[in-house]
Amino acid sequence: MAAMLLRRVLRVSLTLTVAAAAGIAASVWVGKAHAASDLNGSPTAATAIAAVRAAPRVVGQESRRGLPIVLGNRLVSGPGSGLKFTLDDRTTVIIGPNSAITVDEFAADRVVLRVERGSFHLDSANPGNVYVVLPGGTVTVKAATVGGRILPDCAEVALLSVGRVDVAAPAGGSVRLDKIGDFTRLTGYAAPSQPTQLPPHRLQDFVGLTSQIALRANLGAPRL
């Protein structure tokens, strides 16, 4: 009889011990869950994460007023003005009147510029490639000066210095400009036209355009 009573006492004691241990474990798990929730879901943590994600990255400077050029910001010029800026790798970019450009990527050996409309002049100092994305294709600039403009029915690109420029269309096909005055045209999404040498008056159009852009860039009021 005494042995049976002892076994019953031991079973009850063991059950209470297991229940207590389970309760402690559950309490610890809930505490950890609340801690994780506080870390990931609290307004303070969310604000800090958003602030890190939203932190602007300055990649250059506007020439006239020294305003910062921020990665991803759309730069727009008005009808009577232009915009000139220098990137941190010393690449110089000028856009003419009624133009829009964005610095999409910036690295030590790779820069991506997106020109939506208007005209541009680029003097690359990047040891890698500078990519100029146009509505109808991409211009890859390697240590060269290039000018271009987006017209209603096409885009024109000309090599203005020693260096190398590759022009490619989204649907395929590309050409290389490697002589001063080489010129190509992008129409729609078709392959670029075969390079031709601009006659002096047409080359002067691009050089004169560049001078005009530079003048207006210095006098205009850009919108950053």
Image (tube, rainbow, N blue to C red):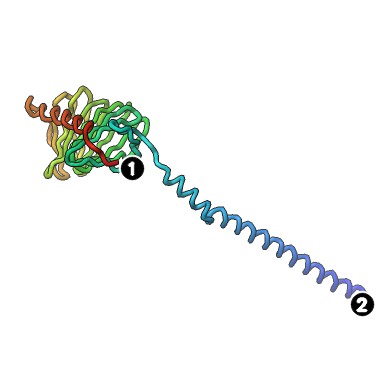
Could you say which quadrant of the image residue 217 lies in?
A: top left
- What amino acid type is highlighted by mark number 2? Met
Q: Position of residue 184 (x, y in %)?
A: 14, 34
Q: Position of residue 15 (x, y in %)?
A: 77, 69
Mark 2 vs mark 1, CA separation in Å? 86 Å
Q: Is residue 130 visible to the viewer in this orientation of the structure?
A: yes
Residue toward you, 142 or 82: 82
| Picture quarter with the C terminus | top left
**Vertical side of 158 occupied by 13: above or below:** below
**Vertical side of 82 occupied by 152: above or below:** below
Residue toward you, 100 or 146: 100
Where does label 2 land, which residue? 1
Where does label 1 land, which residue? 72
Please state the total of marks drawn on the protein image.
Answer: 2
Farthest residue in the right direction? Answer: 2
Residue toward you, 201 or 5: 201
- What amino acid type is highlighted by mark number 1? Gly
**Residue ID at (12%, 44%):** 152
Could you say which quadrant of the image residue 132 lies in?
A: top left
- SS state under label 2: loop
**Vertical side of 44 occupied by 55: above or below:** above
